[in-house]
């Protein structure tokens, strides 16, 4: 691959933006282009993902002053699509269909459509007609269901999940952009409100309003941009179709397949990764994907954290920005922002010393993927 | 309290709701390779065979469960237990379902449960739920 991530931009993350997803996407895209030293006139491709909760690429291109695109894509999916979007854009760039591509995610995830709630009086078609009438229709319920089975088979405890929440909150406390920076002790975590047992409130992502945009370019463009380019070294998708109820082994996620395939198809292994931005809609997602990507043996993630892994001083720092749990739920595109910041050495007080490689994952449960970024051109 | 979410049947799923309206739980099954398919499809995803709505045994065990204590889905009184019920009809075939007449602290993986059909508030539909088998209470 010779595609690079060359620009990053974002809005403030708030509880109530009072703005349209169009306005926020446009601000984030302008910021990402300025960060790269590019202008909207350089852009020929735009892609986004959404669940009918955001604005599509043509409107954002129009707002940026771009009259025509050679390529765009609007993926109808959740966090599992972040990496799909990135690697598809890379393929488009390498195929010569576009040279400068803006990717964005913009949502009023707190004040507008909330993933963690179902609306009253709604009729559900599709597969949801079998789940919603059971009072089982929001993502924290599905992930909690899987986490319970992991507890049953591996003896996983609330303290194990809490170790993830506490560590990420500590990371977020050094991140001025994070929405949840108040330190969290394990006792605080355990005293947290039980929402979808076995999940407590601190097992769940922090829903916010905001937008993130990143700019991907071909190598010849990348070498002329403002900052050190962050290069794509490999990627993987494992988008299964089996769904949340029939997935054979609830103690594993898509990562059990995606992880080995990623390491088999790149020059990297878990030991080579300095920064791991693990998709963390819930603590359990981090747990199961750390296992799947091979950072830790199944059932040992709690011990792994308690032994000082996954944080500063260890071989790999997991979610140095605090992740979706504490920085905010921009649906995983903020993980790519953080990876770029870390690999450029611009992460300030939370800089992972000497970071040269980053793994960024997307999605959880039955579907997701990952990208490996590096400071060296492949 | 507001009404709970209602199903929106389509030609592929209508047989499920017709059956529950008659007080039975029928699932989609391939008439050729005999595989149970849930969610249902117009044709079998394994052999493209024709499907029919066949009654299930109605028994199974709790593969995993949650206790909903935060009312994220309207129309339900918390706490309530939702389980993935592993049906006896086919290995790996699961129905997401509320478990009724069960104290949350008594819920356990592996417990035996039996299906029944109850009226669903707020509309004309009936839904399957499960209750613990008597010797499990």
Image (spheres, coloured by chain):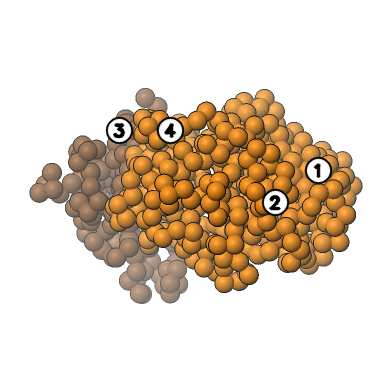
Q: Quadrant of residue A153?
A: bottom left
According to the picture, the residue beneath numbered tag 4 turns out to be A185
Residue B79 - label: 3
Q: Number of numbered discs present? A: 4
| Spatial CA span between label 4 and label 2 | 29 Å
* Residue at horizontal 55 percent and vertical 55 percent from the top: A315
| Spatial CA span between label 3 and label 4 | 27 Å
Q: Is residue A350 visible?
A: yes
Q: Quadrant of residue A179?
A: top right
Label 2 SS:
helix
Label 4 SS:
loop
What is the chain letter for disc 2? A
Q: Marks 3 and 4: same chain?
A: no
Q: Up-down: is A330 above or below A298?
A: above
Q: Which chain is brown?
A: B
Label 3 SS:
loop
Q: Which chain is orange?
A: A
Q: Marks 2 and 3: same chain?
A: no
Q: Are marks 2 and 3 in contact (CB under 8 Å)?
A: no
According to the picture, the residue beneath numbered tag 1 turns out to be A35
Q: Position of residue A76 (x, y in %)?
A: 61, 50
**Image-based side of A190 in relation to A73, left or right:** left
Split into 4 quadrants, where in the image is the N terminus of chain A? bottom right
């Amino acid at each position: 691959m010779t595609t690079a991530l060359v620009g990053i931009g974002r809005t403030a993350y708030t509880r109530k933006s009072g703005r349209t997803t169009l306005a926020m996407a446009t601000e984030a895209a302008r910021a990402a282009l300025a960060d790269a030293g590019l202008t909207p006139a350089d852009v020929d491709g735009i892609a986004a993902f959404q669940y009918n909760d955001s604005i599509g690429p043509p409107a954002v291109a129009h707002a940026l002053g771009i009259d025509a695109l050679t390529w765009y894509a609007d993926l109808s999916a959740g966090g599992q699509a972040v990496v799909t979007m990135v690697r598809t854009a890379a393929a488009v760039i390498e195929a010569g269909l576009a040279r400068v591509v803006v990717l964005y995610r913009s949502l009023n995830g707190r004040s507008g459509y909330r993933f963690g709630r179902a609306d009253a009086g709604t009729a559900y078609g599709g597969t949801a007609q079998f789940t919603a009438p059971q009072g089982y229709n929001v993502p924290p319920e599905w992930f909690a269901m899987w986490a319970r089975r992991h507890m049953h088979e591996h003896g996983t405890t609330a303290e194990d999940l809490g170790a993830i929440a506490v560590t990420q909150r500590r990371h977020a406390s050094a991140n001025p952009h994070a929405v949840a920076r108040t330190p969290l002790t394990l006792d605080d975590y355990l005293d947290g409100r039980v929402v979808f047992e076995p999940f407590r409130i601190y097992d769940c992502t922090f829903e916010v309003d905001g937008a993130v945009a990143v700019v991907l370019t071909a190598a010849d463009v990348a070498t002329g941009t403002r900052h050190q380019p962050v290069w794509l070294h490999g990627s993987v998708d494992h988008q299964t179709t089996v769904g949340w109820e029939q997935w054979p082994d609830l103690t594993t996620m898509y990562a059990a397949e995606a992880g080995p395939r990623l390491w088999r198809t790149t020059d990297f292994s878990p030991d080579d990764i300095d920064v791991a931005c693990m998709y963390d809609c819930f603590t359990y997602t981090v747990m199961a994907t750390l296992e799947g990507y091979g950072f830790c043996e199944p059932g040992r993630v709690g011990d792994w954290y308690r032994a000082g892994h996954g944080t500063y001083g260890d071989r790999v720092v997991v979610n140095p920005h605090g992740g979706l749990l504490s920085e905010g739920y921009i649906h995983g595109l903020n993980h790519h922002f953080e990876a770029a910041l870390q690999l450029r050495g611009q992460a300030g007080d939370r800089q992972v010393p000497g970071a040269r490689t980053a793994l960024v994952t997307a999605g959880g449960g039955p579907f997701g993927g990952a990208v490996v970024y590096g400071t060296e051109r492949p | 309290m507001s009404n709970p979410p209602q199903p929106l049947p389509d030609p592929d799923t209508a047989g499920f709701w017709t059956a529950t309206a008659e007080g039975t739980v029928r699932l989609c099954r391939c008439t050729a390779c005999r595989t149970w398919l849930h969610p249902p499809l117009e044709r079998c995803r394994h052999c493209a065979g024709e499907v029919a709505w066949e009654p299930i045994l109605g028994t199974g065990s709790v593969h995993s469960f949650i206790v909903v204590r935060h009312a994220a889905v309207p129309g339900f009184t918390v706490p309530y237990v939702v389980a993935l019920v592993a049906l006896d009809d086919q290995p790996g075939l699961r129905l997401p379902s509320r478990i009724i007449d069960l104290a949350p602290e008594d819920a356990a993986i592996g417990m035996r449960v039996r299906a029944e059909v109850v009226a669903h508030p707020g509309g004309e539909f009936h839904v399957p739920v499960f209750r613990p088998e008597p010797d499990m209470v």
